[in-house]
Image (cartoon, rainbow, N blue to C red):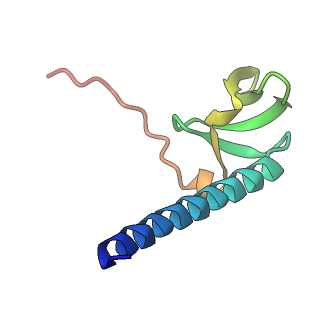
Amino acid sequence: MDPISLFMIAVLGLLIYFMIRNSRKQRKTQEELAEKLRPGAQVMTSFGLFAEVVEIDEDKNIAVLKVAKGVNVQVHRQTLTKVVEEEEIDGASTEVATDKKS
């Protein structure tokens, strides 16, 4: 075999290796998130909403989140991107944007 063919095979092998490695890392992250998702857990959604998990329906792939007292929302489970600790929530900004007209 000529050196160019060997080089191409080596590059292909590296690409496959990194794809498999990345896939395993993502699967591990998803499994860790699934273990932490329990009723009462504080979560952040992919659109930046902080809420408490009330219920998870694995058959329908839906999570019910408590946003405020008496206010529950249903979201797709894939929107739950992070289980947050209380310290992270306390540090979040609670500023409200106001419309300034001068």
Percent x, y of residue 75:
67, 25
Q: How many marks?
A: 0
Q: Residue furthest bottom?
A: 3
Examine the rendered structure and indicate whether residue 37 appears above or below residue 9. Answer: above
Which residue is more in the foreground, 45 or 15? Answer: 15
Residue that appears at 73% across and 22% down: 72
Q: Residue furthest left?
A: 102
Where is residue 24, by image quadrant?
bottom right
Which residue is more in the foreground, 8 or 14? Answer: 8
Examine the rendered structure and indicate whether residue 87 appears above or below residue 83. Answer: below
Residue that appears at 85% across and 39% down: 39
Residue that appears at 51% across and 34% down: 47
Residue that appears at 30% across and 73% down: 4
Q: Residue furthest front?
A: 1
Percent x, y of residue 98:
33, 27
The quadrant the N terminus occupies is bottom left
Residue 18 lies left or right of residue 37; in this view the side is left
Specify whether residue 85 is in view.
Answer: no
Where is residue 26, by image quadrant?
bottom right
